[in-house]
Image: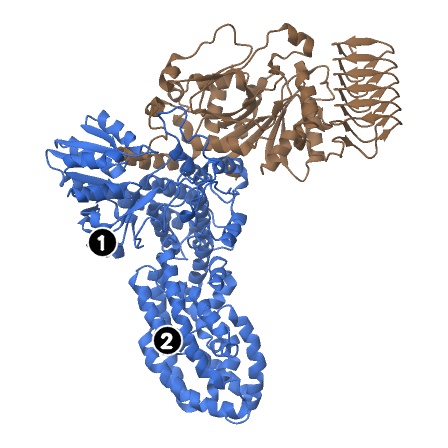
Amino acid sequence: MTRMDFEVVVLAGGASSNLSPLVSQELPKALLPVANRPVLSYVLELLEGSNLKDLIVVVEGEDAAQLVGGWISGAYADRLHVEVAAVPEGVGTAGALRSISSYLTANDVLIVSGDLVTDVPPGAIAATHRRHGAVVTTLLCSSPVSGPSDSGTSGGKEKAKKPVRHNIIGLDPTRQYLLHMATGAEVEKDIRLQKRILQAVGQMEIRADLMDAHLYAFKRTVLQDILDQKDKFQSIRQDILPYLIRTQLSSEVSGNGLVSSESGSNKSAVQDELRWLSQHREIAPSTFQDSQPLSLKSQRDDQRSHKCCVYIANESKYCARLNSIQAFSDINRDVIGEASHLSGYSFSAQNNIIHPSAELGSKTTVGPQCMLAEGSKLGDKCSVKRSVIGRHCRIGSNVKIVNSVVMNHVTIDDGCSIQGSVICSNVQLQERVVLKDCQVGAGYIVTSGSEHKSESLARK
Amino acid sequence: MEPRRPPRTVSDPKVRQVGFVTPAAAPPARTVSDTAAMPAAGASQELPLSGSSLSPVMIPPPRHDGLSARVTAPVPVPIAATALRLDNLQIRVGSYNQSEVLLGTPPMTSPSSRVEDAVSEFSDDVSASSLYGRTEPDKVGTAFPGRSGDLMPAKSVVAGGSIGGSHTPENPPTTSLVVKTLPGITEKKRGMLEKQHDEAAAPKPLKEKTTKAERRALQEAQRAAKSAAKEGGGADPTNTKKDKVVKPTPQKKDVPEVAASSGKKVDRPLEKERKKEVLPLRMQFDDKHKVEKVKQRAIVNQREAKSRVEFFQRLPQYVHGTQLQELEAKFFQLDAVHPSVYKVGLHHLSGKITGGNARCIAMLLAFKEAIKDYSTPPEKALVRDLNAKISGFVSFLIECRPLSISMGNAIKFLKNRIAKLPLSMSELDAKASIQSDIDRFINQKIIIADKVIVRHAFAKIRDGDVLLTYGLSSVVEMILVYAHEHKKKFRIVIVDSRPKHEGQILLRRLVAKGLNCTYTHINAISYIMHEVTRVFLGAASVLSNGTVYSRVGTACVAMVAKAYRVPVLICCEAYKFHERVQLDSICFNELGDPDAILKVPTHVESYLYGCMDNDNLQLLNLNYDATPSDYVSMIITDYGMVSCNQLLIYCSVF
């Protein structure tokens, strides 16, 4: 039996386009290193910590699935029981779910995005979901200070061009129910709200400082029915969730037979229970009512055909999604910085992690909140600040690395200066290269003396 | 006091079983006499034992037991020391080996044959008599002293000669035992009163009696046989000593045999232990050691409540604010708890389900669901395993919120039903039978009971009445609606109180149904009481001395009504009755959220805002109070309308 009647699906994505050139055929998004660990490991370890050991990981693309599957079986062979499912590329989150939905059997399904880096216990969402008997419960967390990275831009330059867009989220006064949700792209000058929902609730709190963390708990039967009936739906967030929110007061969902078929396999028992409850409710209505005596909501609560709930993460919890290059650098910085408990490494007295096998030349300084993985060599008079350097990198003398991520097997020659950049694996930087806010794709060779600013360099 | 505690809470099954057997193992009491400190320990050690074997339900019985214990106390045999036994065994080996050697020669031919004799005869005999001492005080009172009187002098002759001083001090210790047992017993009585909240306690007495009877019959027969046999070689003074030498081992063998013959007996002690383990006696939350222990076991580490009122420190403190989050975060770590039970626990904790009936029904339905999904693990009996499982659920629910008395009674009922399932029943049938039992309980004890109460109460409403009710009671609401539907002309005064304002819910519903209502707060109770002709109140429980245990404020309403000579009618289903006696609302209560009373809804910012951290401020939010029976004119139950004086009968019937 599944734990607490919950099944877990991790949507690990595939070769995400807005992460190019970091993501490549050899390196699917799920395996992007965050503090030299694949980003997927953060989710898997979070789930493992919550005692959830039977997982389904869905990966877009056969090749990516093989890579991810290989990595998981190597790293978590005896700890987790993971099934990796490959789905065709470009089907979207809803499509990915659709292809595996027939395997789901538990009462509720926990859907986690594979690019989530957080320490919010998934149990909290699941328990909130259970407590309210909701159709869907979503985790909201405060958006990162640097602004929501939703726009899918690559780097700061393009970002500056576009106006900052927020997610608009409408909540009821108790902050338990989700009443409205609009993603950044949809929001134009004005927001359209449903009058009916507003009437029913009386008051709606609209917030732009919250971010959908892509951690959902769904009622399985409802999810499956929606996936079956609405075969145009592509994404959970853009299609399924708004649909459920929109229809939460109308009888549309139940009219479609979603709610009525809810009982599913254990129909008799549920019906039985309902009979008892309704019988009792008839004669003792006061014993079955919601906790808020005065708000209009409780009166209207019976009309609510299904509930969409939220769990708002505590401010102190870390929660971020790796869905853009900006986010990639931010998360890398945070995981070895302010959210260091997530990384799972132990920090030295200087508040950095230097693998014992790493070699430092004379007069080379590695500042706090840095990470230097095994086998990397730094020449003389180098300076590393707030950066992550991967395995087996060879870095010459007089190199400055600030606020950057350097992946594995990178060769950096003397006199380079790297700032706010991401250098992928097997890249070669020749002498006196200056990079600022750049992304260098895997295997690229930057010729000596060149200067780049806010560029994306990759092999054609 | 101290030694009494460990055996109760941490009842190790093995020790327990030995304890159950010990009444038969008479000698320890005698060896006890060797060390000066032991009688006292022995007396106190006996407590858990007798506590488990005596019927804890009715209040009178304990007194009776006290008597019986007093009578039996002079007899050294029945005072058995559970924990001491191991020590005693060793002591005995040391001291008696020698005596055996010495005694071996005079009365009988070979020691070994004598030993066998003792195995076959005296062990049984003594076990029988000691058990007698427990059950039938009068007989023992007559039989035992006589016998011991016969035996002891003779023994002392021999002992004085051969063994030396080790046995001569026999009499003094017994007298000291008498002295010591008495306080022990009063303690026990008190313990029982405390224990009444222990849900598992109640199914015991019935069973206990039957087993006792069985056991007695069996042993009476044995005893008759033995006494016949004793006629031959029994007068021999050394016999008793032989007993002591041989008994420890044969006894243990012997008793399981007896138990096996009576079948059910094997299960029962175990079951009892489980219950005890999972449902400990009422915790005293000011006892630091125990609190520490419980904390280690607890699923959620409970934080210290900030401002405790000293008077109520022994009650579980309200920790809702943090507990809900922590419990939620641990959602997936709780293996043993069935999801439906978990959900009910969260609902209790978050206050989504309140009220005795609703909480009870929700719990029972969750249990039903859990039983449906239950399958007996291999090599375990359904009866035992399921009961243990239910106990686990119950302790989880307790952690969410202290049980209401209605829930306690329902659990008692359920466990009783499970325990009574025949072992031969198939799992499917057993599950179906329990599920239908649950359904029946909900239907009969709650739903139909409510309907009956409504009919009874309806007879008491006349045209032109002004009815006053306090807070929110499902039964009272049903009564009012029913009366309204049957064209009675009456007016309702709803009295409410902070901080829950439950009356507003009732007010809203009644007004929506077209009833004529007046709404006021409890401060105005003396003003409004002039016009009232009847007071209808709900109750969380009615205790056996007629005390009504209900939402805090009820006592005040009832008292004012009494002062104005307005009849007070309490509506309470019989399944909520409890045999506990409670004189005030201090000794047992439930603490609510202390911060709730600080929040005054009319002000944006309460005047007391920010005072919470002040050490000089202690907040107390009690959930219940006890209304003395003097203020209650009548209790309307599903058995009819009763006055408080008659209540004890109903309590015992139920």
B143 shown above or below A338: below
Across and down, in percent, residue B425 comes to 40, 54
First in residue order: circle 2 vs circle 1 = 2
| Residue extending furthest toward the left | B463
Quarter assignment of residue A314: top right
Q: Mark 1 points at which residue?
A: B647
Display colour for chain A: brown
Across and down, in percent, residue A103 comes to 54, 30
Q: Which amino acid does label 1 sit on?
A: Leu
Q: State the residue in front, B405 or A17.
A: B405
Q: Is residue B51 left or right of residue B534?
A: right
Are the residues flagged by discs 2 and 1 from a single subunit?
A: yes
- Secondary structure found at label 1: helix
Q: Which amino acid does label 2 sit on?
A: Thr
Residue B230 is tagged as none
Q: Mark 2 points at which residue?
A: B72
Display colour for chain B: blue
